[in-house]
Image (spheres, rainbow, N blue to C red):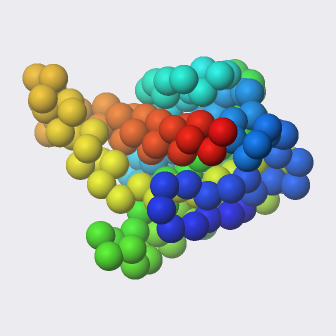
């Protein structure tokens, strides 16, 4: 598992998909917005054009085991034939680590331990929930009553940013 400040971090697994020129390797990825109550999930198409919402996983086991959440994620990885997972790393606006950052790292570590051949990337997700909430509000959605939708939209925002950064490396 790797991470870096900024838009994206590199592959974490021992056998990540090959990329041409450090850019995009074909295959679906799942994006995760990990929270204390819910995990928003998004997916992209194999060519990495567009991220779309998938579902919201309710956190029941949580940090540090993440057993039920990892079981559901394993099902989604199989269902979507995902070649990698992108986990949002929430830091403060100044880029400092927070309790939420530690929780996201805990999830990514548990995921890597449970699926060592699945590349896991950590991506800076500052303001993804704010961006997602604003977009939904602008579209006329009542965001107060739709936390699940916001979590999925935040996962879309972070996955799309990761995709765009990969394509920019071509």
Q: Residue at x 65, y 22 (%)?
A: 47
**Is residue 70 shown left or right of residue 154?**
right
Q: Quadrant of residue 157?
A: top left
**Is residue 121 shown left or right of residue 50?**
right
Q: In which quarter of the image is residue 30?
A: top right
- The N terminus sits in image quarter: bottom right
Residue 77: where, in percent of width, then height?
70, 32
Count the numbered circles shown: 0
Eyeballing the image, is 91 above or below 113? below
- The C terminus sits in image quarter: top right
Q: Residue at x 46, y 42 (%)?
A: 161
Q: In which quarter of the image is residue 3?
A: bottom right
Q: Can residue 113 be seen in this view?
A: yes
Q: Is residue 40 visible?
A: no
Residue 123: where, in percent of width, then height?
53, 56
Q: Residue at x 48, y 62 (%)?
A: 6
Eyeballing the image, is 91 above or below 78? below
Frontmost residue, 6 versus 135:
6
Q: Residue at x 57, y 67 (%)?
A: 4
**Is residue 24 shown left or right of residue 116?**
left
Residue 8: where, in percent of width, then height?
55, 54
């Amino acid at each position: 598992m790797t991470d870096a400040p900024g838009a994206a971090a590199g592959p974490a697994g021992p056998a990540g998909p090959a990329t041409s020129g450090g850019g995009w390797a074909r295959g679906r990825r799942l994006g995760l917005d990990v929270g204390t109550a819910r995990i928003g999930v998004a997916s992209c198409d194999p060519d990495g054009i567009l991220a779309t919402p998938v579902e919201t996983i309710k956190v029941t086991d949580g940090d540090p085991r993440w057993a039920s959440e990892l079981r559901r994620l394993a099902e989604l990885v199989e269902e979507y034939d995902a070649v990698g997972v992108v986990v949002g790393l929430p830091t403060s606006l100044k880029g400092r680590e927070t309790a939420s950052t530690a929780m996201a790292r805990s999830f990514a570590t548990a995921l890597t331990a449970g699926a060592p051949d699945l590349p896991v990337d950590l991506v800076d997700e500052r303001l993804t929930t704010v961006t997602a909430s604003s977009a939904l509000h602008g579209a006329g959605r009542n965001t107060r009553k739709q936390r699940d939708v916001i979590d999925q939209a935040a996962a879309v925002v972070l996955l799309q940013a990761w995709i765009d950064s990969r394509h920019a490396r071509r």
